[in-house]
Amino acid sequence: MSKKQSFLTKYIFSQDHKVVGVQYMILGLLMALVGGYLAYVFRYQLAYPNQSIPGYGVLEADKYNSAVTMHGTIMVFWVAMPILLSGFGNYLLPLMVGAKDMAFPKLNMLSFWVFFVSALTLISSFFVPEGAVGGGWTTYPPLMANPGFTGVGWGAPLWILAVALEFASMLMSGINFLTTTITMRAKGMTFFRMPLFVWMANVASLIFMFSVGPLIAGALMLLADQLFAVGFFLPEKGGDPLLFQHLFWFFGHPEVYVLLLPALGIVAEIITVFSRKSIFGYKMIIYSVLVAGVLSFLVWAHHQFVSGIDPRIAAPFGLTTILISVPFAITMFAYIASLWGGQVRFSTAMLFAISMIVEFLLGGVTGILNGATASDIYMHDTYFVVAHFHYTLFPIVFLTSFAGIYFWFPKIFGRFMNETWGKIHFWITAISANFVFLPLFFVGIAGNHRRIYDPSLFEHLKDFQYLHVISTIGLFVLIGAQVPFILNFFISMFKGKKATENPWEANTLEWQAPSPPGHGNFITDPVVHRWPYDYSLENTEKDWCPQTEAI
Amino acid sequence: MMNWLPENVSTYGTDMDAVMHSIWNIVFVWFLLAEAVLFYFLIRYRKKKGQRAKYKTGNSLKEMSWVLIPAAIVLMFDLGIDFYQNPVWKKVKIDIPQDPDLVVKIEGQQFVWNMTYPGLDNKFGTIDDFKTTSQLYVPINKKVVFELSSKDVIHSFWVPNLRLKQDAVPGRVIKGWFEAVKNGTYSIGCAELCGSGHGMMRGQLHVLSDKEYQDWVYKKTPKKAKKALEAAADSQQENSHE
């Protein structure tokens, strides 16, 4: 540690968990630009079919499929995962438990660079013959198993390779998270004194590790089908296409919670700080999330109600799906209850954290219509589902990440982001997102099925074209609103108002370290005396009480 | 919200619409309640000079009940919804009529629907079978069973007005049914991404009166088959005379 570091070892090939975390975040944000650009391209096509798209040209039907496939793939695996779990997780987890670094710093560096290679692999698939894969982010065979059906040459195996590398990288992160949390906590940091974010990141890592195996098996079988026509999923060779769907969704549904949990952790830290309140029902939230984690392994077939599985199996999966709403109802109610009796300060970070709850609630309740088997017959694979999961994922991925970035920016870079520009960014983002996604509920109910590149071709959808136009214009505004954020981010990094060590008067350990913390994090090893949510204790002068303060 | 559903023209569609309306009404009320409480707290407890927040951890059972009681009510609604809607699922997907008035074979293929009809004799595998492409003709108020299959990739047979969706999976024959209750022409789509022409995989459902349907079948039956059938019928008549 005393060794002098060159720029290369300090910022590029760094083993410091904080640098790795920031690398993940920045690469995730760059990938979000790609994912956003793809959304712009296909939403333009949906609103104004077959017109030349500024900055792209005319979108052919097969390229439309590539665009939606890559948009989904990128946003889930190369934006949400790296920013929420690897980015915030790497940066915050050692600081929050009072460790000097991750348990395995070299593995951590490797995990980022494997992720970097996975991103390059995925992006390269746009430039190979026949372009990126267009079989949907779920990559169902036989469409994706037999090159004769997809019209995709190199794109499909490259997709699998990229995802495999990405998962390897996430596994390395997960090993680090769990080991660091279990073995490297500061003195006095018991499990039930850990901030909720630490809990959430660990449960998310566990869910990821338990669920990813079947998908890796499925992906390898799919690759064997693509390259060597083995036929695991090809009926003419004795295979079964539905097998892949089970393997995919056994991973795919828990994955939703792998993204949701770190987001809930981030929101919990922010709403407590800015309402000067303890979180409401700390252990209740933790147990709810653990129950949800277990349940998340028993719901996967709700993606397959009309897929041709035995219809009698739908009822138990419908029940588990509807039941999983209960632990999350508890969590959401607890978050709302946390605001009771508070002193709410509306900083940009707080506004984003609240908007996450406000918008996520709509995504949550609309899930019931997909979980109930009878209504899912109609809703499945319509824009209603698209609207539903964008109302969950947009708040999870973007609103929460923005909240976290505005909140921890002073710690990460030692400077504040500009609040005025932050609020402009917030209001336009939070409002325009509704213009993008609300109309999709309506077109979905009207019978607009997914992944069709020109809805106006269908008689029953002709009258609803204007909703697609509203959604697309909303997206233009939403993308435009990110310009002030990007400028604010980079300008504040060098020119922002300097931050002290604990500018928000928060309790968790990262705020006891210098801003920004040096390699090794803490100047003196922290000793923990209390849980992290002692805000506004009675009979004390200040309304916060760091975890290091003796009782 | 559910008023945006397209017109329903099937028997079970009425039940499905009732399910969708009820669920929506329940969850939307919950959504509004949660938002109302949230916004009330945000306004009521915004920062005011000289005031201090309350210390309330919600760790005692008594305090937890603020959250657990509403959550228990959510659970009851959840179970209520589940038990209420399960019979509808059973009606649509499990209780396929044993004595249908018509059986049609529907095969998905990139990017059309191949329909095979049993013809005048109502039996498959005879010379009067005939096919149509992406146009499905059925008589009104009759139980129609379809045998769904796929030639290549997974497709999904999707008729919004019937409230019908069922994936077509290569290597399997999946049975389903419907009974249309209103004459007219309705959209058919493919709801599972099936390749470059997925968005153009369109068809139409034509619901005809019984007489129109019989005339249409007669018209579609190949001439040769008609002759053979008539000859067979004649000889049968002669036989019965003897």
Image: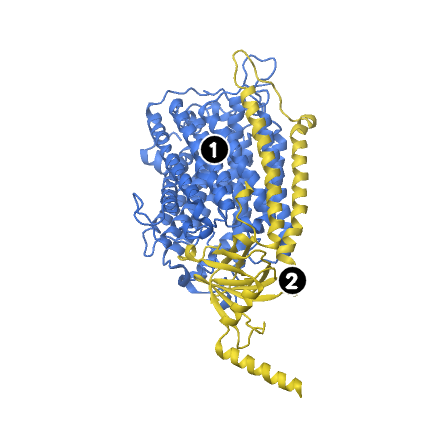
Chain B drawn in what color?
yellow
Type of amino acid at the residue the image marks with label 2: Pro
Pointer 2 and pointer 1 on the same chain: no
**Tag 2 subunit:** B
Mark 2–mark 1 Cα distance, whole angstroms, equals: 50 Å
Residue B219 lies, in percent from the top left, at 50, 71
Density class for disc 2 (Cα within 10 Å; few <14, some 14-19, many ≥20) is some
- What is the letter of the blue chain? A
Q: Is residue A409 left or right of residue A293?
A: left
| Residue at which label 1 appears | A400
x and y percentages locating residue A381 in the rendered image: 50, 50
Estimate the x, y position of residue A340 in percent, counting from the top left: 59, 22
**Could you say which quadrant of the image residue B91 lies in?**
bottom right
Question: Would you call the spot at circle 1 few (<14 residues within 10 Å), some (14-19), or many (20 or more)?
Answer: many
Depicted A282 relative to depicted A77: above or below: above
Q: Are marks 2 and 1 in contact (CB under 8 Å)?
A: no
Local secondary structure at mark 1: helix
- In depth, the one of B87 and A21 nearer the eye is B87
Above or below: residue A238 compared with residue A392: below
Give the numbered dot on residue A526.
none
Instruction: Say whether residue A295 is visible.
Output: yes
Nearer-the-camera pick, B217 or A280: B217
Marked residue chain, label 1: A
Q: Which residue in the structure is indicated by mark 2?
A: B97
Say which amino acid is labelled 1: Thr
On screen, residue A18 versus residue B59, left or right, reads left
Nearer to the camera, A287 or A375 = A375
